[in-house]
Every structure is written in C-alpha cells, then in structure tokens.
Amino acid sequence: MGNEVPPSASSITRLQALSPLLLSLHKLLLDAERDEYQKVFGKVSSSGQMLKLVIEDPWFSWLRKLSEIIALIDETLESKTPITETSAQELLRATKQLLTPTEEGEGFGKEYFDALQRDPDVIFKHREISKLIG
C-alpha cells in the first residue's frame, strides 16, 4: 500500500465542504420527519424526547445512514492516518450513492425521495450537494 496516491487538494476541499452541507441536509430531513411524526403521534415535548426518538424509534432509522456517512467523512478528515485519493473518491461516491432517491422500494432512497417531494428546501440542498460531489 506504499504506492497509494495522496488526495488532491480538490478532493480534500470537496470533502471539507461536503460535511457541513450534509449536516444541514440532515437537519432539514430531521425537522421534516419530526413534523410528520408529530402529525401521527402528537407533539414531541422536549429535545431529550426527540433525541431518544432519533436514536431508538424505527420512524427515524433511515436517517442513521446519513449520520453514518457524515461521521465517516469527519473521522477521515480528522484522522492522523493520511487519507488517499482512492479513499477520498470512495467517500464522495458513497455519498452520491446514498443520496440517490428511489421512487420504489424502501430504505433511505425511498424515504429521501419522499422528503424531496415534500420539502423544497431539501431539493435546494440536494442540488447544492450534487454540484459538489458531481
């Protein structure tokens, strides 16, 4: 593995820009899901209750995939182990794949498709991220 190529400045810059955009998208999606959840189950009374729901309730489980990729990007950028161009590109590809909405099926792609249909802010954030990751 000694022949691994260091990441280009472009790849590092894209990953550094991607993390806060994904966090912003996550917040939009979480807020929208909270609103939908409250329509069905009633008001969430505190931030502590909301945190418990996000961690434990199946309603929010699809958002964990986005949380995981954000954490992976942040860990990679903060790691003392040098990142390679291959790993930087793989993170960008994984993000692009995750954020591919699907009209059919279940899981993240379907839930993300539905969120894009409901919320123009999610559409705008999706476009911004898509421009960055190609």
Image (cartoon, helix red, strand yellow):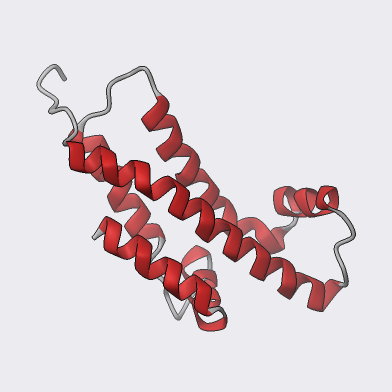
Percent x, y of residue 118? 57, 82
Q: Residue at x 27, y 21 (%)?
A: 82
Q: Residue at x 16, y 36 (%)?
A: 8
Foreground of the two, 47 or 3:
47
**Picture quadrant of residue 102:** bottom left
Q: Quadrant of the C terminus?
A: bottom left
Percent x, y of residue 121? 52, 73
**Picture quadrant of residue 40:** bottom right
Q: Is residue 23 left or right of residue 89?
A: right
Foreground of the two, 64 or 125:
125
Q: Quadrant of the N terminus?
A: top left
Percent x, y of residue 97? 34, 59
Q: Residue furthest left?
A: 3
Q: Is residue 76 left or right of residue 105?
A: left
Percent x, y of residue 86? 20, 37
Residue 102 sits above or below residue 56 on the image: below
Q: Is residue 129 left or right of residue 59?
A: left
Q: Residue at x 14, y 25 (%)?
A: 4
Foreground of the two, 110 or 133:
133
